[in-house]
Image (cartoon, coloured by chain):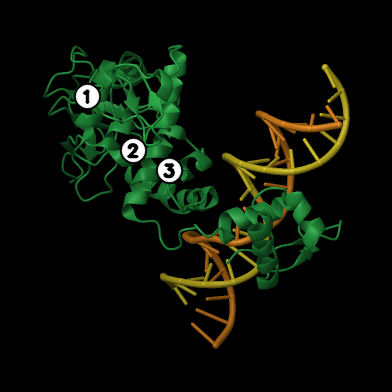
Chain colours: A green, B orange, C yellow
Amino acid sequence: MGRSSRISSKDGLAKGAWSALEDEILVDYVKTHGEGKWSNLAKHTGLKRCGKSCRLRWMNYLRPDIKRGNISGDEEELIMRMHKLLGNRWALIAGRLPGRTDNEIKNYWNSYIAKKAKDQFPSTRSVEIIDKKEDIRVDLQGGVALSCGVCPQQQGKEDAIQLNPDTKNAALTGPFSGNGLTKPKLELENTPTNFILGFSSEDFSNMLDYDFAKLNDGNINELKNAIEGDSSGTLLNPPLSQEITEKNGDLGSSSSAAEGDQPNNNNNYYNYNMVSAADLFQPLFLDSNDGWQVGDDIDILFSN
DNA sequence: AACCACATCAACCGCGAGGCT
DNA sequence: GAGCCTCGCGGTTGATGTGGT
């Protein structure tokens, strides 16, 4: 697939599909000189490709850590979730999928997910609240499970699932009435992956340094404890904790560690302030006084 | 078998950000 | 500050694969 015909541009540089020999030259160069300085590559190797093309070929195809094969179900779900939050920021999404490239995810989205989501999910539907937690999962029986974080604080925020307060108590209406389909089953799952769903783009960007690998599904309380003031864990990885520390003007170091400071793996101390962490994350949780009641019907607008 | 329409995905293009002079 | 260069990103293109008729 792709382009195979070899085209020569005006400046004598080749275009189109890469040959095995070109790949070999590029790989050898990167092995010797490392990534970067792409424009020098052609000069040093005689490869008749522009630096931009070399970088693209390396990043999207020749890198040793590229993951081959189909996108898994888990990966697809994560792509869908992150796209809801971030929009078409493919590089950012790819950064959370090891071995996948932005180009690959973009292609996958355009050729598969977007179509599937459009086909299966009309822009609005009504669901019933059957429980109150910080996350609501809409699971269409027999359809593709599209999880949605819904919380009042997200109203009006771009890229977030929006709640229409005017129809909060309306009867169930829309495409699921009278067409043979069952009423959507509403489930609630308390998982780290669902936890991230309700964030706006801005909120989410603050979360990207969080080391989610330290959390397992079903272990969301660990994160909640951290946010609510339990400083016993080493949940915050250095980039985020340092950010918080610096924000508080209280830069920690091994020589100035104080009581309550937490060491990281490198024996450096990050005396992160959980109050600040709470400031950062607390707005993302559903407040107990939000006014939602079990049994309420709500309309959810799925924005693209 | 031949043709056509659509899907896939590698690669190209334009643009903006950031660094350097 | 202006101009140039490099890099990275997102949108788009187009050759090829695939399935239907």
Q: Given the image, on which type of amino acid does mark 3 rest?
A: Arg
The residue positioned 41% from the left and 25% from the top of the image is A254
Name the residue type under label 2: Phe
Q: Secondary structure at mark 3?
A: loop
* Residue at point 30%, 39% (across, down): A214
User: Tag 2, which chain?
Assistant: A
- Marks 2, 3: nearer the viewer: 2
Left or right of A245 in this view: A73: left
Dot 2 falls on a residue whose secondary structure is helix
Question: Do badges 3 and 1 share one subunit?
Answer: yes
- Both labels 2 and 3 in a single chain: yes
Q: Amino acid at mark 1?
A: Asn
- In space, the residues marked 1 and 2 are separated at their CA atoms by 15 Å
For marks 1 and 2 on the same chain, the one whose residue lies earlier in the sequence: 2
Q: Is the residue A279 above or below the residue A103 in the image? A: above
Mark found first going from the N terminus, 3 or 1: 3
What is the spatial separation of the Cα atoms under label 2 and label 3, in whole angstroms? 10 Å
Q: Quadrant of the C terminus of chain A?
A: top left
Q: Which disc, if any, is residue A212?
A: 2
Please rate how many residues cluster around mark 1, counting C-alpha atoms within 10 Å: few if below 14, some from 14 to 19, many from 20.
some
Q: Position of residue A172 (x, y in %)?
A: 18, 29
Q: Is residue A87 above or below residue A25?
A: above
Provide the chain ID for the residue under circle 1: A
Q: Quadrant where the N terminus of chain A lies? A: bottom right
Q: Which residue is mark 1?
A: A225
Pick whichever, A281 or A255, lies toward us. A255
Q: Which residue is mark 3?
A: A96
Can the viewer see residue A23 in this picture? yes
Give the crowd class for mark 3: few <14, some 14-19, many >=20 residues within 10 Å. Answer: some
User: Sequence order check: which comes first, mark 2 or mark 3?
Assistant: 3
Task: Kindly indicate whether the residues beneath marks 1 and 2 are on one polypeptide chain.
Answer: yes
Front-most of residues A189 and A229: A229
